[in-house]
Amino acid sequence: MADTILTKGTDKKRRVWEIDFLRGFCMLFVMWDHLMYDIWALFASEITTSWGKAVAAFAKSYWTSGIRTATHHWFVGVFVVVSGLSIVFSKNDLLKALKVAAAALPITVVTLIAQD
């Protein structure tokens, strides 16, 4: 009974939707946080339009705001815990980790090049 309430999907592939929801929500926060940092710290000096400067100012105000300070560690902690729970339920952990690393490496290289 509890298994039916907590999961959805077919018998072949049952998912705990609450974990997926929390992980997705935290991923959106992480992407937002990184986007605001990139706009403010990496690209703000190169922005010349008034609209771009307003976006960069917003990014800086977000990055230094009390809202970010108050929620950042909570979202990071929930993301780490939920990701750990996902690993417990998953199969082929090494293969998935290699896929993520393969996707992350080009992003890291581009970010390092953009900083220089």
Image: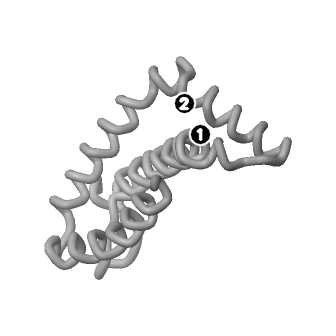
For the residues marked 2 and 1, what is the alpha-carbon distance in whole angstroms?
8 Å
* Quarter of the image where one finds residue 77: top left
Residue assigned mark 2:
63
Label 1, secondary structure: give it: helix
The total number of labels drawn is: 2
- Closer to the camera, 44 or 116? 116
Mark drawn on residue 2: none
Q: Residues within 10 Å of mark 1 (few under 14, many from 20)?
A: many
Residue assigned mark 1:
40
The x, y position of residue 83, in whole percent, is: 27, 53
From the image, which quarter does the N terminus lie in?
bottom left
Q: Is residue 95 above or below residue 111?
A: below
Residue occupying image coordinates x 14% and y 74%: 94
- Closer to the camera, 90 or 48? 48
* Mark 2–mark 1 CB contact (< 8 Å): yes
Q: Residues within 10 Å of mark 2 (few under 14, many from 20)?
A: some
Q: Residue furthest top?
A: 66
The x, y position of residue 37, in whole percent, is: 52, 41
Q: What residue type is labelled 2?
A: Trp
Q: Which amino acid does label 1 sit on?
A: Trp
- Sequence-first disc among 2 and 1: 1
Could you tell whether 66 is left or right of 49 in the image?
Answer: left
- Choose mark 2 or mark 1, whichever is in front: 1
